Amino acid sequence: GLVRDVITIKPKDDMQKLIEDYNIQIGDIMYFADSDGVPNHAVIITKIEEGMIYYSAHTESRMNKAVSYAFETGTEQLIVLTIYDDAN
């Protein structure tokens, strides 16, 4: 398959540690999810900088928005699907 890991991120998690431990990269897929872990929106990771993940989306135009914004506006958890670099 194309997916290397599935990572759940909650507001108080150490983002830098997750980025390093799971090699989260630009181009990985991220879902916003409710408290039950049910995904309700997909976005693309478009920037990683200083221990923060940023995403871009089109439903409400977002370009390089920090995941902290998603948590501040009601998202309860994020689910990241890391993709193999050489996914053929």
Image (cartoon, helix red, strand yellow):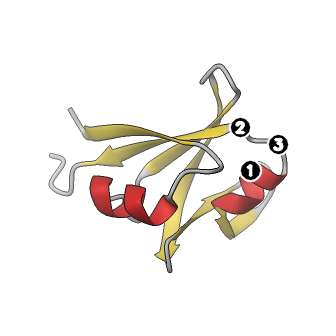
Residue underneath mark 3: 74
> What amino acid type is highlighted by mark number 1?
Phe
The spot of residue 76 in percent (x, y) is: 71, 37
- Taking the image as drawn, is residue 27 in sight? no
- Taking the image as drawn, is residue 34 in sight? yes
Relative height, residue 54 to residue 1 (above, below): below
Q: Counting residues from the N terminus, which is met first, the one under dot 2 or under dot 1?
A: 1
- The quadrant in which the N terminus is found is top left
Q: Nearer the viewer, residue 88 or 73?
A: 73
> What amino acid type is highlighted by mark number 2?
Glu
Residue drawn at x 50%, y 78% as measured from the top left: 49
Dot 1 lies on which element? Answer: helix
Dot 2 lies on which element? Answer: loop
Residue underneath mark 2: 76
Q: Nearer the viewer, residue 48 or 20?
A: 20
- Cα separation, mark 3 vs mark 2, equals 6 Å
Q: Nearer the viewer, residue 74 or 40?
A: 74
- Cα separation, mark 3 vs mark 1, equals 5 Å
> What amino acid type is highlighted by mark number 3?
Gly
For the residue carrying disc 2, how many other residues have a C-alpha within 10 Å: few (<14), some (14-19), or many (20+)? Answer: some
Residue underneath mark 1: 71
For the residue carrying disc 3, how many other residues have a C-alpha within 10 Å: few (<14), some (14-19), or many (20+)? Answer: few
Dot 3 lies on which element? Answer: loop
Mark 3 touches mark 2? (CB < 8 Å):
yes
Mark 2 touches mark 1? (CB < 8 Å):
yes
87 vs 36, left or right, is: left
Residue 51 is marked as none
The spot of residue 19 in percent (x, y) is: 39, 61
Relative height, residue 52 to residue 6 (above, below): below
Residue drawn at x 74%, y 52% as measured from the top left: 70
Mark 3 touches mark 1? (CB < 8 Å):
no
Number of labels in the image equals: 3
